[in-house]
Image (cartoon, rainbow, N blue to C red):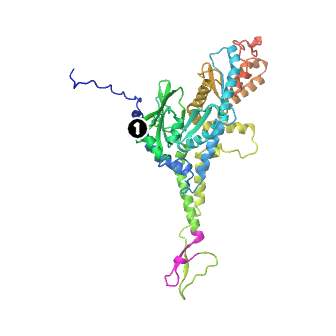
Amino acid sequence: MPASAAVKPPARRKGDLSEPEALLERYRVARERRGVWESHWQECYDHALPNGRPFRGGGTPGERRVDRLFDGTAPDAVEQLAASLLSELTPPWSRWFGFQPGPTLTGAERDRVAPLLDRAAGIVQAHFDRSNFAVEIHQSFLDLVAVGTASLLMEEAAPGAPSSLRFTAVPLAEAVLEEGPDGRLDATFRRSEATLAQILQRFPGADLPDEVRKQAAGDPDSRFPLVEAVLPDGTAYRWGVVLDSGLAEPSWLAQGRFAQSPFVNFRWLKAPGETYGRSPVMKALPDIKTANKVVELVLKNASIAVTGIWQADDDGVLNPTTIRLVPGTIIPKAVGSAGLTPLANPGRFDVSQLVLDDLRGRIRHALLVDRLGPVESARMTATEVLERSVEMARLLGATYGRLQAELMTPLVLRAVSILRRRGEIPDITVDGRLVELQHRSPLAQAQAQRDVQATLRWLDSVKALGPEAEATVDAAATAHWLGEAFGVPAKLMRAQVAGAGLDAGAGAGGSNG
């Protein structure tokens, strides 16, 4: 073979991210696709969540970001809706999930496994409660309501910490997401900056370029860009962190694999063909901007009404630039001149309050404040409580289904994986066959209330029909079903005996093994 026909190295196949340059290129492409959203997100932040991290420039911690905000209806409604999501989906210090035996287990196996599963669920819940979960998930809910997409980082805490779990609400300004073939946001890029000391603390064995060390030696406060990526790889996830300093070639700081992604990305709702979610603030943004402008004009008109607009003859005696309109001021004027004369206000803003009340009502309605807000009545009947729960389930039904799939289930599965590896809970697999995940949040309970009420009305009707009708009721099966609907711990319910209740005439309907 001639020397000129040297064998070329094999071309890197598309999607091969073994080199840091390839990972950075994929990040840049995903970042460009996200660019069309940023101006829209910034508008939502400016008018509804002014303390959110800006997308144009990093901003300064503690700076004022409300100078262009004149109406506080939207920020208040966003906080109320985020608080409602926290209390209805993941209430702090309350059991919002549980484990129960799966359908493949027999009655005796269910009786033996149920107490273990209930104890394991209590341990997992305790780790959530002792961690910073409530604080960080609330911040994520604020992002969810404002811009429709949120990201929560779930890491394993260091040994000796009060909880084995540690959470961080990732600002959307740092997160770049990709949607997988199953419709979930399973590919995550996060760009952040860190000093050399912070890099060495997090990655003690990293091989850093000499150029980076030299710059840090001259300026210890220098911050270097890091790009962290978690990408699906079969049934697991690849993790890598690249140092993109610009002083030398990009280099790996760390690489690894996860069984579940540490980034939990979730959306309020999404339009077909779009990656990022859409929020209720986006729907109400025209009313929010209009209300903000109306209040600005009202304040300007109020300042004119208080101070007035004046005119004066330039007669060489009166100097308008030196006049101060305060009580007790003596304003000189020439003999026979008009002096200082008020200018009539050309319009009235009496109608502004009517327009503003209508806009604020629509904003609260779009952000569900008028329907999910606190109860005004001190006492509510059982029917009113039920109807309120049904209304809540109807309003948040579609959103709850998405949050259950994208937020709550991944959270619990990753927590189980971490605690099982650390030996704090038994070696269980929540796969839906041997062990089922049971959602017990207030909203999940509200969705089951209508079925429970229908069943109880049926039992009352059957009882009114007499003993022959009552014989058709399997009391044990009914009690077991009601227990599951009410979220009763599995250890309090004995498994049903196979064939029990089939022979109502023989009195087996209410028997238990």
Left or right side of 441 for 13: left
| In the rendered image, the vertical position of residue 217 relative to residue 308, given as above or below | above
Residue at the spot 55% in from the left edge and 82% down from the top edge: 339
Who's the residue at 60% across and 59% down the image? 353
| Number of other residues with Cα within 10 Å of mark 1, as a class: few under 14, some 14 to 19, many 20 or more | few
Q: Residue at x 66, y 39 (%)?
A: 87
The quarter in which the C terminus is drawn is top right
Q: Nearer the viewer, residue 483 or 98?
A: 98
Task: Label 1, secondary structure: give it.
Answer: helix
Foreground pick, 284 / 175: 175
State the image coordinates of residue 147 (x, y, percent, origin top left).
53, 43
Residue 217 spot, x, y in % from top left: 47, 44
Is 365 above or below relative to 403? below
Q: Which residues are magenta?
A: 304-324
Q: Quadrant of the N terminus?
A: top left
| Residue at far bottom of view | 335
Quadrant in the picture for residue 452: top right
- Tag 1 residue: 29
Q: Residue furthest right?
A: 467
Q: Amino acid at mark 1?
A: Val
Q: Please tell me which residue lies in front, 436 or 321.
A: 321
Residue 97 visible in rendering: no
